[in-house]
Amino acid sequence: MASSSLRSDPQNWLIGKPISLLSTARLPRMLDVLQLLQFHHLTEGRTLPESYKMTCDAAICIWMRARIPTQRVDSCVRKLSKLHQNYLALKVHRTRKRESDRMKEDNS
């Protein structure tokens, strides 16, 4: 099976395909949260602040079901926006061949 590299392909660099729901079988990872954010923002066409809020609400709901204390939603949105900005910074330098860029990709 050949991999598609078209611009219309819904798979995103480094994080994979967007997901519409977080799994309730385990706690969400940063990768899962970024995939859900990409679904809300790119697939559904919502603005970034709306996407941040909806993604944080979904993640907090899972943490509350597990009875794990959480922070306020605005703190979650701030951390998610920082995570998304770091992803975008990695994405900008994905074609560079420098060793430092490859190490940053491997660490994330």
Image (cartoon, rainbow, N blue to C red):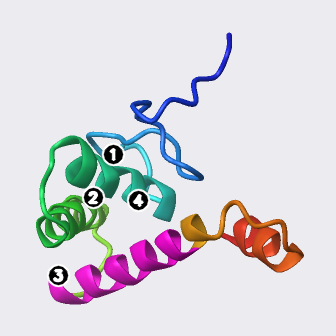
- Give x and y (percent) for residue 95: 70, 60
Residue toward you, 17 or 8: 8
Please identify, in this view, whether the residue under mark 2 or under mark 4 is nearer the observer.
4
Q: Earlier in the sequence, mark 2 or mark 3?
A: 2
Q: What residue span does the magenta drawing correspond to?
A: 72-89
Mark 4 = which residue? Answer: 34
Estimate the x, y position of residue 65 in percent, counting from the top left: 24, 59
- Mark 3 lies on residue: 73
Mark with earlier residue (3, 4): 4
Q: Residue 4: name its quadrant.
A: top right
From the viewer's side, name the closer residue of 101 and 20. 101
Residue type (three-letter) at the residue carrying disc 1: Thr
Which residue in the structure is indicated by mark 2? 62
Q: Residue at x 40, y 51 (%)?
A: 35
Q: In this figure, what is the number of numbered marks? A: 4
Q: Is residue 6 left or right of residue 75?
A: right
Amino acid identity at mark 2? Ile
Residue 70 visible? The answer is no
Residue designated by label 1: 24
For the stretch drawn in magenta, the main secondary structure is: helix
Question: Judging from the image, what secondary structure is the residue with disc 1 in?
Answer: loop
Q: CA distance from mark 3 to mark 4?
A: 16 Å
Asked which quadrant contains residue 57, the reply is bottom left
Type of amino acid under label 4: Leu
Crowding near pointer 1: few (<14 within 10 Å), some, many (20+)? few
Q: Are marks 1 and 2 in contact (CB under 8 Å)?
A: yes
Query: Vertical placement of 6 versus 42: above or below?
Result: above
> Residue drawn at (48%, 37%), measured in percent from left and top?
11
